[in-house]
Image (cartoon, rainbow, N blue to C red):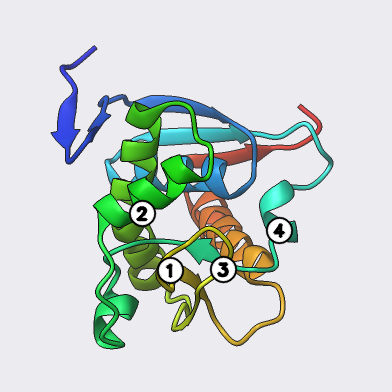
């Protein structure tokens, strides 16, 4: 296996073929990352259809230091997000650090790569700044997850680099 490549506070381990277990937002985010780096990916999901719990999310997706926040003049920071998360009861600061510091680039990636509207911001419970992103649609979790699913399915239809297996 090749040496890991550092990207901020996380590491990417280069691989040619990857199996992703779970066809929700996290699974399809991982699958698209594999494709972006030139690999092949199979997504396995135990259900007859993909989506997972992410499709049920009705508030939006949290991110700090995003382009949406900057465009609206909201001065949020990764460290403030870390502080809010730890104050909320998170027990593993090293995991919180990765979650919060990668949240902004992740939200920006969703906007840029999948042309998602995440232009509305809300300050929800436990947050000291508006950092919950959504668009005008009623169910943002479904909208975000389906965009990733459809993008992956499109690649699967035209190449052997992507495949989805349901009822796995």
**Cα separation between marks 4 and 3:** 19 Å
Mark 4 vs 3, N-terminal side: 4
Q: In front of the other: label 1 or label 3?
A: 3
Q: Nearer the viewer, residue 148 or 65?
A: 65
**Cα separation between marks 1 and 4:** 19 Å
| Relative vertical location of residue 141 with respect to residue 38 in this rendering, above or below | below
**Cα separation between marks 4 and 2:** 24 Å
Q: Quadrant of the C terminus?
A: top right
**Cα separation between marks 1 and 3:** 8 Å
Per the image, the residue denoted by label 1 is 131
Mark 1 vs 4, N-terminal side: 4
Left or right of 155, for residue 76: left
Left or right of 63, for residue 79: left
Q: In front of the other: label 4 or label 3?
A: 3
Q: How crowded is mark 2: few (under 14 residues within 10 Å), some or many (20 or more)?
A: many
Residue 83 shows in this picture: yes
Left or right of 131, for residue 150: right
Q: Do the residues labelled 1 and 2 touch (CB within 8 Å)?
A: yes
Mark 4 vs 2, N-terminal side: 4
Residue drawn where x is 21% and y is 36% of the image: 9
Look at the numbered disc 3 and give the secondary structure of its residue: loop
| Relative vertical location of residue 92 with respect to residue 147 in this rendering, above or below | above
Look at the numbered disc 1 and give the secondary structure of its residue: loop
**Cα separation between marks 3 and 2:** 12 Å
Q: In front of the other: label 1 or label 4?
A: 1
**Residue furthest front in the image:** 87
Per the image, the residue denoted by label 3 is 124
Mark 1 vs 3, N-terminal side: 3
Residue 51 shows in this picture: no
Per the image, the residue denoted by label 4 is 55
The numbered disc on residue 81 is 2
> Could you say where residue 10 lies in the image, as x and y percent from the top left?
26, 34
């Amino acid at each position: 296996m090749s040496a890991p490549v550092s990207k901020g506070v996380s590491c990417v381990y280069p691989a040619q073929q990857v199996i992703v277990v779970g066809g929700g937002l996290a699974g399809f985010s991982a699958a698209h990352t594999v494709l972006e780096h030139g690999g092949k990916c199979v997504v396995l999901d135990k259900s007859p259809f993909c989506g997972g719990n992410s499709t049920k999310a009705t508030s939006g997706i949290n991110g700090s230091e995003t382009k949406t926040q900057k465009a609206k003049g909201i001065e949020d920071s990764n460290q403030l997000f870390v502080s809010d998360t730890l104050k909320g009861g998170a027990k593993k600061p090293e995991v919180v650090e990765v979650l919060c510091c990668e949240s902004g680039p992740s939200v920006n990636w969703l906007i840029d790569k999948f042309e998602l509207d995440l232009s509305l911001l809300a300050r929800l419970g436990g947050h000291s700044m508006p950092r919950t992103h959504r668009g005008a649609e009623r169910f943002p979790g479904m909208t975000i997850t389906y965009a990733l699913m459809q993008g992956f399915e499109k690649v699967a239809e035209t190449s052997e680099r992507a495949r989805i297996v349901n009822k796995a």
